[in-house]
Each structure stands twice: as structure tokens, then as C-alpha cells.
Amino acid sequence: MSAVDLIIKKRNGKALSTGEIQAFVDGVSDDSWPDYQISAMLMAMFLKGLDTRETSDLTLAMASSGVQLDLSAVPGTKVDKHSTGGVADTTTLIAIPLVAACGVPVVKMSGRGLGFTGGTIDKLESIPGFQTAITAEQAIAQSVRIGCAIMGQTENLTPADKKLYALRDVTGTIDSIPLIAASIMSKKIAAGADAIVLDVKCGSGAFMPDLASARALAHQMVDIGEHVGRKVIAVLSGMEQPLGNLIGNSLEVLEAIDVLQGRTTGDLLDVALTLGSEMLQLGGLAKSDSDARQLLKVTLASGAAVEKFKELIAAQGGDPQVVDEPSRLPQATLRRTVVSTHNGWLAAMQTQDLGRALILLGGGREHKGDALDLSSGLILHKRLSQAVQAGEVLVELLGNNADKLEQAVTLVTAALVISPEKPVFAGGLDKPPVIYEIYRGQS
């Protein structure tokens, strides 16, 4: 069947066979399908949808379009985690060393930040000397030795997905749950883990704005995992406010260290423990959430998790002394503050705009390849539902460009809502939920 015939078939709402989807992905990979035909197929998929089998076939075809990691040399059940992204989402820097210190190996492939959400690779590169551009062979050898590695995405991983994403970005076909799910899961499957924990975020600081859309994406990805024989669960977590109190690359490393050293608790730790619990259960190290959390808390309190983070830093060429001497991290030269103009409660915030303020300060990027100021960022002094007094500092902004700082102050000021009455959130709660639900599939 020709490319035109396949496009017409999907345009008419018919399901494509496994072989037809493979033919489409092959055409993307070997350039035998021109961009205009690929774009036409993407639009047909966007408008007519894909069922679970079609989405799974697309996922596997994209995963097999490039190199797939073979982690069999790493002993034990290898468990990966993936977040759909949010502001101050620093859970990878906490969960990976914590889970590895418990005894579950993790070979993690992470990306850079784009838009209002940060990237794990950028955060790690704020640690002097830390190398994220390690090969798959180096990552595997390191994981055999210390139980974990965090590497940047390799160029030859899911090349078909890279091309499809670039075309979706310019053809208005980004917001398709099956296409999003296939894109994420193809990379996770190609990365070689036996089991995957997904952190699907929703709210004003997330890619998925509401619980319904986050739930649809979570269910689709877990169902793909079941269909292709991988163990996958999804945690649906809230992003109505930044997960941590520090926003920015070196600042988020600092907060991760504080959590691993037991100095900081709150939402960031809560989500990291939830993800870590699911990872330990999938890795066969715990039979229940209570058992897993107990092991995680004992490991955290013993100092083994922060020592594992030091070990990870040193193994990838970084300076492990940043853990005990955070002044070794990049430091901004200028500070500004946003203060409350009246008494009340912090009732709401446009969390995306806090992420956009980081971009203004140079700590995030609008376009792939933009250089970053790793020292810039924001420090939140108040969280939703907390009381504030007139003149009290709400946010500190750190940067190295006075004009950009002033612009960011304006943006942050407009993003915060102070109410004369204490807010009430979904379900009558006095603060927005951090964990909504966990989806473990239909089996």
C-alpha cells in the first residue's frame, strides 16, 4: 500500500495494521516519505485518533528506529522514572540516589529543559565538572559499579520520534494523547529498563493543565506498557505551585542536597518518596507501599542516599564537595525581592509564569540550543494557603542582569494572588493535592 493509500485509510478513520504503521515509521526513518506526506499522516492521526494497539505499534516502531540499550549486564530489575515536567520538579536528583542506595539499579536517560519546565541534565551540569554526555557503555558499567547513572539522551535514540516531534511542533499536532504517549514511551522502551514509573503532572505549572487530560495520558502510557510487556505504573501529581521552593538549575541541586541530607521536607520530598516507593516495589525490593516507604526513610536518615549522590557525582566527573560546600555551585551576583502589598493568604499562582521568569533570568530556554545562566533563579518564601503580612517577602529573584531582573519581578508579581480569605482547594482541602492517584493498569 502506497503512502497516499495509508494516509487516506487513516483519514477515513480506519485502524492501521502493525505492518502499515511500521511502513510509516520506516518511511520517516529512511526519508522515503517526504515531510508533506508525514505531516498529512500526523494530521490524520491527530483528527481520527489511534487505538491502544495502533499506539503500541507506533511506540515499538519508533523505539526500534535507532539504538536500544541492553541493560542485561546490570544485575537486578532495572527501574526507570519519567516526569512529564513541571516547575521546580527536582525529584530525579532525589529519587535516583535514594532508590539506588536501597538496592534497585537505575540507568536514567534525561533531557534538557525547554519552555517553562526545567531539565535534569541542565541541573546536573551546574555541578562543576559533571559529565552528562557519557556513552551507553559507560552508563552501564557505572551502574554495575555503583547502581545508578544519569545520562543525556543519545542522538541515535528513537530518531524517528525526533523527526515526528519536529513536524508535530510546526503542524499543530502536538496535543494528541496517543502521539504524546507514543513519543514518551518509545524513548523509555529504547532506554532498556525492565519497569517504568511515570510521574504525570497536572496543573498551572504542568504540560497537562487538568486532571482529566493527565489521567488520559497516564492511562494511555500504562496501557502501552502492558501491551508491549513492560511493567509500568503512573503517579498523577499536582503542579498548582512549584514542587520545590527553589527554582533554577544550581538552586534545585542545592534543594535536592538539602532533602537528601534531611534538612528539607514538604511536597518535593513527598513526591520523591511516592515515586521511590513505586520503584522499589517494581524492582522487587518491597511488597507494599508501607514497606517501601520504611526502607526509603531508613536509607534517607542513615545518610546512605546523600553518600550515593556524592558517588554519582564523582563517577561522572563532578565535584562531590558541592554536597557539603554548596558555595561551589554557580552563584548569581544580583538579587531582587517581590513583597506582599497587603495582609492575606497566598491563594493562587500562575506557576507557568514563575517558570517563564526563570527563562527571563537566563535559567531556562525558549529554543533548543539556547545558552543558560546556571546560577539564576527564584526562591519561594511562601506556599499556597500560607498567611502573609504586608511588606513580607514572597519571592527572591537571583540573576546577573539588572534589566532582566526587573522584568522578572514584574512577571512574578502578576503571577501571585493574595486573597483576604484563606483559600479552599479541591475536596475542601486547605492546600492543593500533591498526589491525586496512582494508575497501575487494567491487569
Image: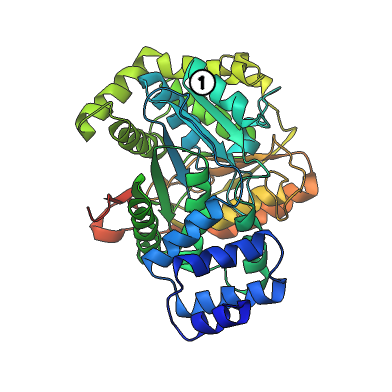
Judged from the image, the secondary structure of the residue bearing numbered disc 1 is helix
Q: Residue at x 50, y 82 (%)?
A: 9
Task: Quickly name the residue at label 1.
Answer: 309
Instruction: Note whether 207 is above or below 395 in the view shown.
Output: below
Residue count near mark 1 (Cα–Cα under 10 Å), binned few <14, some 14–19, many ≥20: many
Q: Quadrant of residue 266?
A: top left
Q: Image quarter for residue 5?
A: bottom right
Judging depth in this view, the residue of 45 and 312 nearest the camera is 45
Point 43% across, 66% down: residue: 54
Quadrant that contains the N terminus = bottom right
Q: Which residue occupies the foreground of this view, 175 or 355?
A: 175
Picture mark count: 1
Question: For this view, does 210 lie left or right of residue 119?
Answer: left
Q: Is residue 357 above or below residue 213?
A: above
93 left or right, relative to 331: left
Residue 141: percent from left, percent from top:
56, 20
Of all residues, the one furthest to the front in this rendering is 1
* Amino acid type of the residue that numbered disc 1 sits on in the rendered structure: Phe
Q: Nearer the viewer, residue 101 or 338?
A: 101
Q: What residue sits 59% from the left and 62% below the top? A: 25
Nearest to the observer: residue 26 or residue 153: 26
Residue 101 visible in the displayed image: yes
Q: Position of residue 388 (x, y in %)?
A: 44, 47
Residue 36 occupies which quadrant of the picture?
bottom right
Residue 205 visible to the viewer = no
For residue 319, above or below residue 348: above
Q: Position of residue 354 (x, y in %)?
A: 58, 52
Judging from the image, the colouring scheme is rainbow
The percent position of residue 230, horizontal first and vertical second, equals: 36, 45
